[in-house]
Image (cartoon, grey):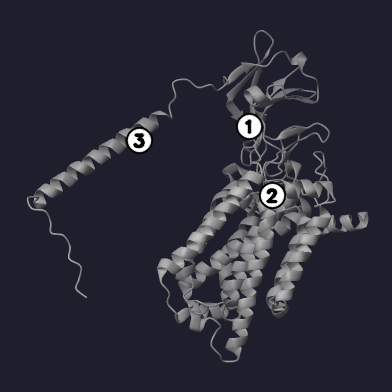
Amino acid sequence: MNFITDAINTLCRPAILFTISCGVFYLVLFKWREQFSQKRTVIALELGMLAFILVSMLNPTFKDVVTKPDNIPIVGMLFLVLYFTWLYFHKAVINDNLIAQGKDVENKAEAKQMTYTWPDLVFSEFICTIVVWCGLLLWSIVLKAPLEEPANPVETPNPSKAPWYFLGLQEMLVYFDPWLAGVVLPTLILVGLILVPYIDTNPKGNGYYTFKDRKLAITTFLFGFLILWLLLIVYGTFLRGPNWNFFGPYEVWDLHKLEFLKNVNLSEYFWRGLGINGGKLPDNPFIREWLGIVLTIGYIVVGPLLLKKTLMKPLFDKLGAPRFYITAGLFLMMASLPIKMILRWVINLKYIVAMPEFFFNI
Amino acid sequence: MPLPSFPEAPEGISRRTFISWVTVGWAGFTAAMGTGLTAVGRLFFPNITFEPPQQFKAGFPTEYAVNKVDERFKKKYGVWVVRNEKGIYILSTVCTHLGCTPNWLEGESKFKCPCHGSGFYSTGINFEGPAPRPLERFKVLLSEDGQIYVDKTLKFQFEKGQWNDPSSFLELA
């Protein structure tokens, strides 16, 4: 028994769970799409997840975390996300096969049919409103609001968690300076989503589900949503405990858990690690951080050019220069999050450019 | 199907009258909003504040054990008083990452922030988590009656080399 719980705890270490999730993401999208889209797969997965959670309730820590009124909706969300992701693949695979056979997509005839707003649409909206209302009423009666002690500026609850939908952002803040993770990156998420219709004028996939017609767009979106947003919410909800340490799902939330997290800046790795300048960091911040500055500028400037020449060449031909560079820029900013996270987990890298003198850390 | 007929404009209101009334309406609206916003702006300057004073006396140096982080003024003034072999310094309880209040963990001898996991040594130097710079220190000196005098209006930041300033550290012979 201990062996199994230890194994699961280990698998839930941040770097390992992230790697596994990315691996599963890749396999489902590109290797097992057909199998994943079967009805029996989603039933098996949902039941498997339910069984896993029920059996895990035997563990007191797991039970505490999962049944906390705050967290129950998040558990529910996991089931819903799995279902809706599956539903998309289910419909997309059917359509992709139809398109491959040269036939019309599934709902084309249906799409041409017209119905009235009143009573058809308004009536079903009304029913939905009532169902959601009942759900909220029941929820508010059964699950008590997790109120805490009165706010006190000198005593921060430990751990201090953002509302669940912001836990992904809070997790981001662990890896970046606040101005980046709190201001620049969230703004870019919003700006990027607003820009999508202007960048992406490809009419394929309008009004019907498809994967093969829109591989890059759908993969990017699903990676951003499932891995960079939801997986980080799962991290923040279930795996972050006191002192914002990582805990396995069956690990007791020990206030005094000791983790050696001594972080090192890239400049310290460079000057101390290579013993240049006698292992001393130069006083001038620009000389001290030259490697990080070069790498960052290279990432932002050379990155899009490289993508244009290699991986995204067809996209450049299709979009033209202005659209392509905006897309590539957004793409690289999105990729910067997992890059920084992995660097932190693997080599304890704190900042690539660390200039606290100017409040500028990347 | 015939087009729906719109009601005729009522008699007696000329274009000029209409525009005059609209102008009066908008002017009134702007004035009301302006007054309201000014009244709201007044709230930013309260007559009295309940903030603790920025300068205070923190007792005699002998009340502080050597190599201990003292939390007695954390709640009231938001500072830790730390005494080492050489003397006393005052650390701010505001995390330099996003401003939460870290906890002093005696067993691990470090400050640990519950929001994003930043960690600081008892000196205030940051060593783990995302905090980009060390905790700030406040001005401290010995007042004439022999008590420790803390002035929170003057802060000293390590990364600017200000910890070398003599008033950031109270040397005890």
Task: Report helix, strand or loop for mark 2.
Answer: loop
Closer to viewer: mark 2 or mark 1: 2
Quadrant containing the C terminus of chain B in the rendered view: top right
- Label 2 Cα crowd, 10 Å radius (few <14 / some 14-19 / many 20+): some
Closer to viewer: mark 3 or mark 1: 3
Mark identifier at residue A93: none
Mark identifier at residue B37: 3
Quadrant containing the N terminus of chain B in the rendered view: bottom left
> Between marks 3 and 1, how big is the CA–CA gap?
42 Å
Closer to viewer: mark 3 or mark 2: 2
> Between marks 3 and 2, how big is the CA–CA gap?
40 Å
Where in the figure is residue A70, as x and y percent of width and height? 67, 46
Q: Is residue A359 visible?
A: yes
Q: Residue at x 57, y 81 (%)?
A: A213
Q: Residue at x 70, y 39 (%)?
A: B113
Please say if B94 is above or below A188: above
Dot 1: chain letter: B
Mark identifier at residue A71: 2
Please say if A246 is above or below A114: above
Where in the figure is residue A362, as x and y percent of width and height? 62, 52
Contact? badges 3 and 2 (CB < 8 Å):
no
Kind of residue at badge 2? Asn
Please say if B46 is above or below A141: above
Instruction: Confirm whether circles 3 and 2 share one chain.
Output: no
Mark identifier at residue B162: 1
- Residue situated furthest top in the rendering: B145
Out of B87 and A13, give the one closest to the viewer. A13
- Label 3 Cα crowd, 10 Å radius (few <14 / some 14-19 / many 20+): few
Dot 3 or dot 1, earlier in sequence: 3
Q: Residue at x 18, y 46 (%)?
A: B22
Dot 3: chain letter: B
**Residue A87 sits in quarter:** bottom right
